Image: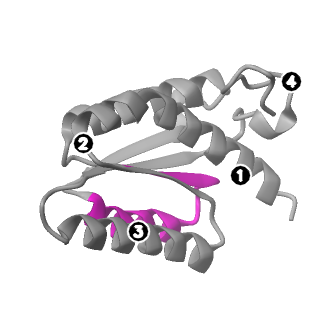
Amino acid sequence: MFGADKGHVDATDARMNGKKLKIGIVQARFNASVTDALALACKTELLALGVAEKDVDHITVPGALEVPVALQALAEKANYDALVALGCIIRGETYHFELVANESGAAVTRVALDYQLPIANAILTTEDMPQAIARQDEKGRDAARVAAEMANLLEPL
């Protein structure tokens, strides 16, 4: 899948073919400048992988703790090949960072396992805003690639 160049996707790899996929994206609005960039990079990459624009549903929720319940609602519709979780949690001065990071991550995983549905988790957890900004585009693209690859991997299983 990945060539010698970091992040290079082999366009001939069938696992990355998005032409028949339906993808749901749940984006937290908290730290919107970062999550908007994550969403743009993710949707742009999904289109580049062949996912039709009409087959990408994108919803927003207040923050990272609300992402899993929205993912669960989409999973219950049972018409998605994969889902994507987008968010940005930046460490502050209290324990709240750990709580939000741990709980949102565990809940996203639980939804994926409960529904046997791939969920690309791109909820960033960073020390500060510059780290988040440095990761927003690459992690958005990565989430799209993970969603496509895992959907194609699980489809025949």
Task: Label 2: state its secondary structure.
Answer: loop
Q: CA distance from mark 4 to mark 1?
A: 16 Å
- CB atoms of marks 2 and 4 within 8 Å: no
Disc 2: CA contacts within 10 A as few (<14), some (14-19) or many (>=20): few
Question: Which of label 3 and label 4 is nearer to you?
Answer: 4
Q: Which residue is mark 1?
A: 151
Where is residue 139 drawn, in percent x and y? 49, 37
The residue range painted magenta reads: 64-86
- Between the residue at mark 3 and the residue at mark 1, the CA separation in whole angstroms equals 18 Å
Residue matched to label 4: 12
Q: Position of residue 40 (x, y in %)?
A: 39, 27
Task: Pick whichever, 74 or 105, lies toward us.
Answer: 105
Question: Residue beneath label 3, please?
Answer: 73
Q: Does residue 137 appear to the left or right of 119 in the view shown?
A: left
Q: Is residue 42 visible?
A: yes
First in sequence: mark 3 vs mark 4? 4
Q: Quick one: SS at disc 1?
A: helix
As drawn, is 83 to the left or to the right of 3?
left
Nearer the observer, disc 2 or disc 4? 2
Labels 2 and 1: the sequence-earlier one: 2
Side of 135 relative to 15 (left or right)? left
Neighbor class of circle 3 (other Cα within 10 Å; few <14, some 14-19, many 20+) is few
Question: Disc 2 designates what residue?
Answer: 128
